Image: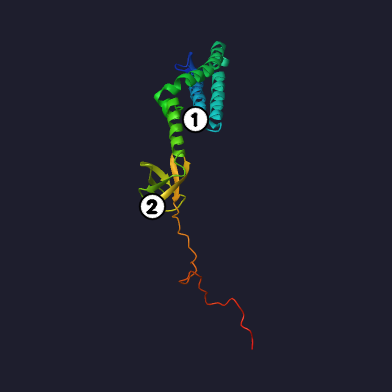
Amino acid sequence: MTPITVLIRFETGLKPELERVSYGKSTDLMDYSLIAILALVVTLMLFVAEIFLPSGGLIAVLALTCMASSVWAAWMAWWGTSPTLWWTYIASVIILIPTTVGFAVKFFPNTSWGKKIIHELPTLEEVTGFQQETAHLQSLIGKTGKTQTLLNPSGFVLVDHERLHCESQGMIIETQTDVEVIAVEGARLVVKVKKQPTAEKKSPEPETSQTGEPVAGDTLDFEIPET
């Protein structure tokens, strides 16, 4: 479609008046320019999101799609009319993408939003404290204690005058039951009911007479001769 359409209007029937009406070229250029800029902004945001949000590559695909749309819109807007703007746009894309990503990697984790999205690594003091607590719980393995609450299957146990969080092996254990620490899982003790020692059954002592000789039982230790 040609950008300029010549309309001929006869007003008096003597002289035609030419009117030049400009159609859509400037409007189209503005639309494509706006699309190119907005798509480029969205592309930069998606590249930053791809770094910090796990998406399995989905965000990266969306970012590349937006970048392709931005390049296409810029080509439609500036390639034929203003090559200078076109090459300025290309240079901006080459500079802005790595600059934005590098800026986000360096400064975004220190912002309030970054701290909410990215979990900070534990400090040395926190790691040391956790190791000490784990070693303390490991030292309680084999010791006995008494349940302070109903274990269903987790609860609390008193070991060495210390109230600790514990859990059973899937069994319900009543309160004030003697238990034994058998393992440590995370920050919990794993306990089981302590087996009570059973009294050994003693064999009866043989009866003795007043002279100290053993008394024979009901059975005879000799055969009766047949008559």
Number of labelled discs? 2
Say which residue appears at 42% left-offset and 49% top-offset. Answer: 179
Q: Which residue is mark 2?
A: 177
Residue type, numbered disc 2: Thr
Compare residues 4 and 149 and report the one nearer the observer: 149
SS of the residue under disc 1: loop
The answer to whether 49 is drawn above or below residue 151 in the figure is above
Classify mark 2: helix, strand or loop. Answer: loop
Give the amino acid type for the residue marked by disc 1 in the picture. Leu
- Label number found at residue 53: 1
Residue 59 in the image: above or below residue 220: above
Residue 120 % position (x, y): 45, 27
Left or right: 162 in relation to 57: left
Residue 25 in view, yes or no:
no
Q: Quadrant of the N terminus?
A: top right
Q: Quadrant of residue 156?
A: top left
